Image (tube, rainbow, N blue to C red):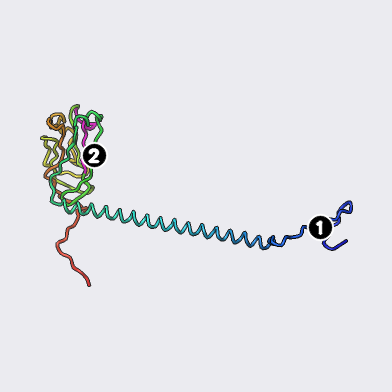
């Protein structure tokens, strides 16, 4: 029997398939597969690095935007440190009242006054849960640990002056009959606070009149 031949039953001779000239050896094929996997891993690593850089840039952008927003609020607080009167005009007051039930309130945007931010009005067109039918209610949200002097008003109706904090005298349940205070010409209602003074608060924005530069 010739070398390289395999004899099987029936005296049939089977010869192993000869490898073609351009056909890679099993070792070469394995090396190519490993190289392809290495390139795939490098591509994945590059994509992960790109995503990480994008996330870092996004985090930095969000941090900058948050800082700018805080800075803008601080500037507004400083600019409004002499403000004692704040008006909130509500257009189409009767329509607003018709859209709400007793106990529902609408909130104003946050505002600053007297060197302090974080104030906000809560207005109940049909009154809160404790007032008589027909009355509206008005509350002034005061920051925690802060005491102010304030006079609340709805139209011509006034309540105050009175000291108030986050829990005491923050508003009036039976402020007035809302329909009596609506401007008949414009249909609007002016709500607000006057004589607002911050008596004490750890949140007051400090203003400086002198700075020292270090070289």
**In the drawing, does residue 28 fall left or right of residue 132?**
right
What segment carries the magenta color? 120-132
- In which image quadrant can residue 39 be found? bottom right
Give how far across and how far down residue 62 sits, in percent.
34, 53
Location of mark 1 (residue):
15
Res 211 visible: yes
Give how far across and how far down residue 101 sits, in percent.
25, 29
Mark closest to the chain's N terminus, 1 or 2: 1
Magenta stretch secondary structure, dominant? loop
Reply yes or no: does residue 128 show up in magenta: yes
- In which image quadrant can residue 184 be found? top left
Looking at this view, name the residue that lies furthest to the front. 21
Res 130 visible: no
Give how far across and how far down residue 102 sits, in percent.
24, 29
State the quadrant of the C terminus. Answer: bottom left
**In the drawing, does residue 172 fall left or right of residue 38?**
left
> Which residue is at a point 24% across and 55% down the rendered structure image?
71
State the quadrant of the N terminus. Answer: bottom right
SS class of the residue under badge 1?
loop
Frontmost of labels 1 and 2 is: 1
Location of mark 2 (residue):
107
Q: CA distance from mark 1 to mark 2?
A: 91 Å
> Which residue is at a point 20% across and 39% down the rendered structure image?
139
């Amino acid at each position: 029997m010739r070398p390289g031949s395999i004899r099987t039953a029936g005296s049939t001779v089977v010869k192993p398939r000869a490898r073609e000239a351009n056909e890679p050896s099993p070792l070469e094929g394995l090396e190519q597969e490993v190289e392809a996997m290495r390139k795939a891993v490098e591509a994945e690593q590059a994509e992960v690095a790109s995503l990480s850089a994008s996330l870092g840039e996004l985090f930095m952008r969000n941090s900058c935007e948050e800082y700018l927003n805080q800075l803008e609020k601080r500037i507004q607080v400083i600019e409004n440190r002499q403000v004692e009167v704040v008006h909130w005009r509500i257009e189409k007051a009767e329509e607003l009242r018709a859209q709400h039930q007793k106990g529902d309130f609408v909130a104003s945007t946050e505002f600053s006054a007297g060197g302090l931010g974080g104030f906000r009005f809560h207005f109940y067109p049909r009154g809160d849960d404790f007032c008589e039918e027909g009355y509206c209610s008005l509350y002034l949200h005061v920051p925690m640990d802060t005491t102010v002097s304030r006079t609340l008003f709805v139209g011509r109706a006034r309540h105050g002056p009175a000291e108030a904090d986050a829990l005491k005298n923050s508003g009036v349940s039976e402020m007035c009959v809302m329909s009596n205070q609506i401007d008949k010409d414009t249909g609007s209602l002016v709500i607000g606070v006057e004589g607002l003074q911050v008596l004490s608060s750890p949140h007051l924005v400090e203003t400086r009149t002198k700075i020292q530069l270090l070289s």
